[in-house]
Image (cartoon, helix red, strand yellow):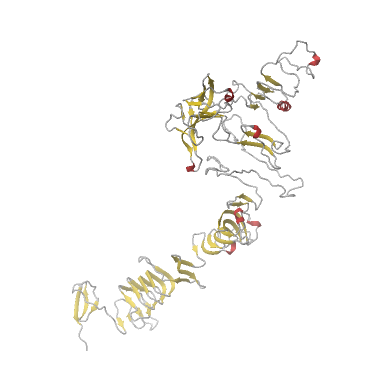
Amino acid sequence: MQISKNSIKYILAFFPFTLIFYGASSAARADDSPVLQSQINQPNGVAGLDASGNVTAPISTSNIAASGNLGAGTAPSGRHYIAQGLSASVDGALLPSTFLIGGIGEYDAAPTKMTSPLIGHGDYGGCVLNVQDALFEQFARCGAGLDEAVVGMFKTVNNSPLFEAGADITSKPSDTVYTVVLNGASVTITPAISAADQNRIYPHTRIYTNVRNGMLNTAADGSTNTPAIWYGYVSTITSTSTATTINVTIDPDSSTGGWMLDTGTTTTTAPGSNSGDVTDTYMSSYTHPAVFIGASGKRFVFNTMIQLDPTVKDSVTRAGEGEESDLQLLDPTGYHANDKFFTVHGKTIVVTGKDLAADDSYLMRLAGSSLMPEGLDVDGIEHGGQVIHTDAGYQYYSLGDLNSASAGSALLISQLGAINYNGTFASLLMYGWKNSNTTSGWGDNAEFHLGMQECQNAAVMSGTSIGASGCTSGGQIVLNPSGYHYGIGLGAGIGGTVNYGLYVDSNGASYIPNSLTFQRSGTAQGAFTTDAYGNLLFNGANFILEDATKEFQVYGATDLKGATTAAAITATSLTSTGAIQGQTITSTGTLTAAANVVANGTITSQGYYVALSGAANAFLRQQTFAYSSFTDPDSGVARDAKFGQDGIAVSGGTKTDTLNVTTSAVLPFGTPASSSATCTAGQIETDATYIYSCVATNTWHRVSNGATW
């Protein structure tokens, strides 16, 4: 290997240890002249050596080249602090060209520090540390551009393989076309690989084939078209005059021969001969067997790791911090003396380019594996600042303290989203509203709102304020609305000026402060409202109970302005300017109707009389009439019931007393089917010829109805 003189100078300056070169012995001196003591470790002299052969004075030269291993310093373990080209006996899983600092022996400490001012652009002092995953360093420049400077530059790219071979490939750097045969645990390449090509093949390097067995992911599933490629690791390389054989293992740290898939499947059958094997056309387009050596399916720029093991003996470690960036805003003049002087960005992840990423891509992932109590912890944001800011409409603000707000004002907590439709930007806002300045807690003093706000300004996608100029507030869900502590309200408006359509109190009771309108096919059919006296008014078509088994009951005076139809109607006092019709009609007070009162069941009036007005045939009874005792205010005579203005009265105190008809009585007009037709004792009917009376159950008698005069 070649090491520049500057590299050696830096190593010697940073690490004042003994420098030992292992390699071929130096050439013999040109002559056998003796060396004077005055020439040892002196200019134009010779280097002095101690009894162990170590140089006794620092080496200062314009060029040092070591053709073998390199080691610097002697650590407590007896190994070097710095080394390169360790033998396999020290670490057989290590690439020989790896440059090691510390950790070569157990408990060897070798902290590394680099200090440099950032003075320029790119590789001209634009980076203190520049680490690049690239095939050629010359084109892997530091990414500091314009007037920027970078302390640490780390970069990876999807490089081509270090070496590839196949009948369809011209291999570099020799420009040779090789034939590849894939075997169960090896690859045979013909002709034998040239020395220049073999120099690109490192021990334990990953080796891919162009044979796949299924797919790991597909674009149809929202990911990438990623084939399951057979691959392995370079174990040993042997060559003859005609061919080179590369033995392949399934793991770089084992000697188990064979191939594997990323699914975990392994095989010792040659790729292409397993069930399901096909020539891959996603990664390459070659028709003949091929191998690609020195590549990776996934690349990481950083992979930091903390391993915490509670069984480690006598460990005092109890906490781990994956990564911490300390951004310090220092000002010797005092707190807030120069606010907003610097712009600070903690972490920025930027995706650039021209193509969309796959659907399963993301900029940041937090995976707790069901072991973490919190996923993201954000604190310390200045009051009113945005804890989370997006260009998708979602914003989260550092607010929530209504104590400092004035009465009649809002504090925005979050913008949950924003949508643009034809230039109108609607956002969903979560905010608190303060009604008063009292300190007795929430009560009627404060509310929690979730509502919509429309603006004609695209800036709302990045955040807005409650009641912003040019904006209109829409529907609101209000928690703890004024007057309904622990309740909820629905309405439209903003803050304390919301027009409510519904309240639900802490007991679950519902209240409608305005009208309740019913619609059918988008057309209003009627509305319930209240008047200044607390009366419930229904404005619209008839109010009908369609289910004949249900009752309509009103406790209190009821004034029906139109026809009323229900299965059962019950009221303290029932008045209608139209007809009343029901299966059962009950009034605990006055029952008044301007049209027919029809019941298929029972009509009950618990008041002092039933007044019927309107048509002559205003009252129709089809089954029974229930009644109770009362005092007639017209004459003060105790009776059971009275119908009509001058119609029917039942005198006395029992149902068997005299029935007085003051004008006329109309009997049912009809003819029983026979003398044994169904009837109830006391039932009377008449026709043009006879008057029929039921003298016993299902027993009729009749007498002549007489003749005209």
Q: Is residue 149 left or right of residue 259?
A: right
- Coordinates of residue 375 in the picture (x, y in percent): 57, 43
265 is higher (above) or lower (below) than 417: above
Residue found at the far right of this picture: 38
Question: What is the quadrant of residue 131 in the picture?
Answer: top right
190, 530: nearer the viewer: 190
Question: What is the quadrant of residue 498 in the picture?
Answer: bottom right
636, 196: nearer the viewer: 196
468 is higher (above) or lower (below) than 140: below
Q: Is residue 61 left or right of residue 172?
A: right
Q: Is residue 288 left or right of residue 638?
A: right
546, 362: nearer the viewer: 362
User: Which quadrant: the C terminus?
Assistant: bottom left
User: Which quadrant: the N terminus?
Assistant: top right
- Coordinates of residue 337 in the picture (x, y in percent): 75, 49
Q: How many marks?
A: 0
Residue found at the far bottom of this picture: 709
Q: Residue at the location (72% across, 38% down)?
A: 118
Camera sees residue 374? no
418 is higher (above) or lower (below) than 197: below
Q: Residue at the location (62% across, 49% down)?
A: 387
- Coordinates of residue 627 in the picture (x, y in percent): 34, 74
- Coordinates of residue 459 in the picture (x, y in percent): 62, 55
Q: Residue at the location (66% across, 18% down)?
A: 23
Camera sees residue 576? yes
